[in-house]
């Protein structure tokens, strides 16, 4: 069964991206950003919020992983680029949108 904990590898990949960028290997860290991998769990699990296929109550605390990946991606991109540019803003505001939608859930 799929649940939001399937996003943990994405978050781990983004933490590794931050570490590689802090070491000075920015070219390598761009190739390992991992947001492409995030699209599949995002679409799968975001559709489950409003659909009939609900996640069991015991697994609901892991919903924070919905906005953890894009917020970690914004931190990783800041480590790579060093500026608050458009890509970083898009990922940051996506995480705020997901947080607000989970609060309303």
Image: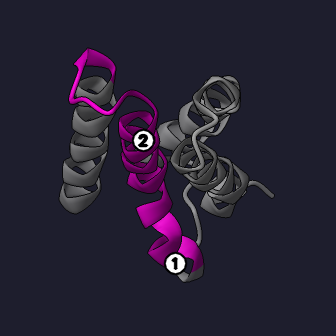
Count of picture labels: 2
Report the colour scheme: one colour
**Location of residue 57 in the rendering, given as x and y in whole percent from the top left corner:** 52, 78
Residue at point 58% right, 75% down?
59
- Nearer the observer, 51 or 8: 8
Sooner in the amino-acid sequence: mark 1 or mark 2: 1
Extreme residue toward the bottom, this view = 58
Query: Pointers 1 and 2 in contact (CB under 8 A)?
Result: no
Above or below 31: residue 49: below
Quadrant (top left/top right/bottom left/bottom right) for the N terminus: bottom right
* 70 or 27: nearer the viewer: 27
> In the drawing, does residue 85 fall left or right of residue 28?
left
Provide residue 89's location: percent of width, then percent of height.
Answer: 23, 28
Residue that badge 2 annotates: 79
| Residue at the image position 48 percent from the left and 40 percent from the top | 46
Q: Determine crowd level at label 2: few under 14, some 14-19, many 20+ residues with C-alpha closer than 10 A.
A: many
> In the rendered view, does 64 fall on the left or right side of 18?
left
Check disc 1 and report the residue beneath it. Answer: 57
Residue 5, percent from left and from top: 66, 63
> Between marks 1 and 2, how big is the CA–CA gap?
36 Å
Q: Position of residue 27 (x, y in %)?
A: 64, 23
Residue at the image position 55 percent from the left and 37 percent from the top = 42
The magenta segment: 59-87
Answer with the quarter of the image where residue 74 lies. top left
Quadrant of the image for the C terminus? Answer: bottom left
């Amino acid at each position: 069964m799929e649940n939001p904990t399937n996003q943990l590898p994405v978050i781990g990949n983004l933490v590794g991206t931050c570490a590689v960028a802090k070491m000075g290997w920015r070219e390598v860290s761009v190739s390992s950003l991992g947001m492409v991998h995030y699209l599949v769990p995002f679409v799968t699990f975001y559709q489950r919020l409003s659909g009939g296929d609900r996640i069991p109550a015991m697994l609901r605390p892991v919903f924070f992983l919905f906005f953890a990946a894009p917020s970690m991606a914004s931190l990783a991109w800041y480590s790579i680029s060093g500026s608050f540019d458009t890509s970083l803003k898009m990922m940051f505001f996506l995480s705020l949108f997901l947080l607000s939608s989970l609060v309303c859930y």
